[in-house]
Amino acid sequence: MTTLYIDADACPVKDEVYRVAGRYGLPVFVVCNSWIRTPADPGITLVVVDEGPDVADDWIAERAGPGDVVITSDIPLAQRTLSAGAQALHPTGRPFNPDNIGGALASRAIGEHLRSMGEITGGPRAFAPQDRSRFLQALDTAVVRARRAGPA
């Protein structure tokens, strides 16, 4: 069965994921470093992991596989997700895929390098209503694709 995993710390589209999961009857794992409110729904499981770098990412990467969808803005987690055969989707609706993950990782590395040299890089643009709409469409598409493909 297709499972949705949310890298939940600072994820702006959790409610949208819950709505799509409810429509398709899919389980959702909400993974974060501290307690957050989640709907009282037996299909939604809150997983609070220990504090520390990449602990939530590791939890997700160890479980996501073919037929699953991971919602994350973390590019290294997206790469790990793709390597495991799952789909990765950014909260703005941009799917990560084998064709764009290398460029995303390179851009991230360049930004980190510039910041380490004291450059001000500006960060990501603000989340907009169009992003929420684009995300809903992209998640629906990813779920349909995952359900068609199923686990390997």
Image (cartoon, grey):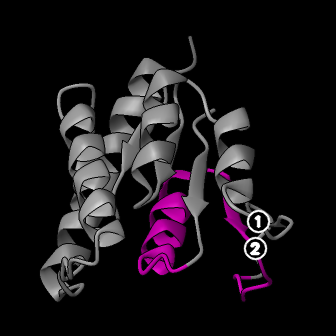
Q: Do callouts 2 and 1 mark residues in contact (Cβ within 8 Å)?
A: yes
Q: Magenta stretch containing residue 12, yes or no? A: yes
Note whether 48 is above or below 23 in the view shown.
below
Would you say 139 lies left or right of 38 here? left
Can you name the residue that lies furthest to the right here? 50
Looking at the picture, which amino acid does disc 2 mark? Asn
Q: Secondary structure at mark 2?
A: loop
Residue at left 18%, top 66%?
A: 134
Looking at the picture, which amino acid does disc 1 mark? Gly
User: In which quadrant of the rendered image does the C terminus lie?
Assistant: top right
Q: Which residues are magenta?
A: 10-39
Residue at left 44%, top 57%?
A: 74
User: In which quadrant of the rendered image does the N terminus lie?
Assistant: top right
Would you say 21 lies left or right of 143 here? right
Mark 2–mark 1 Cα distance, whole angstroms, equals 8 Å
Q: Which residue is mark 2?
A: 33
| Disc number placed over residue 52 in the picture, else none | 1
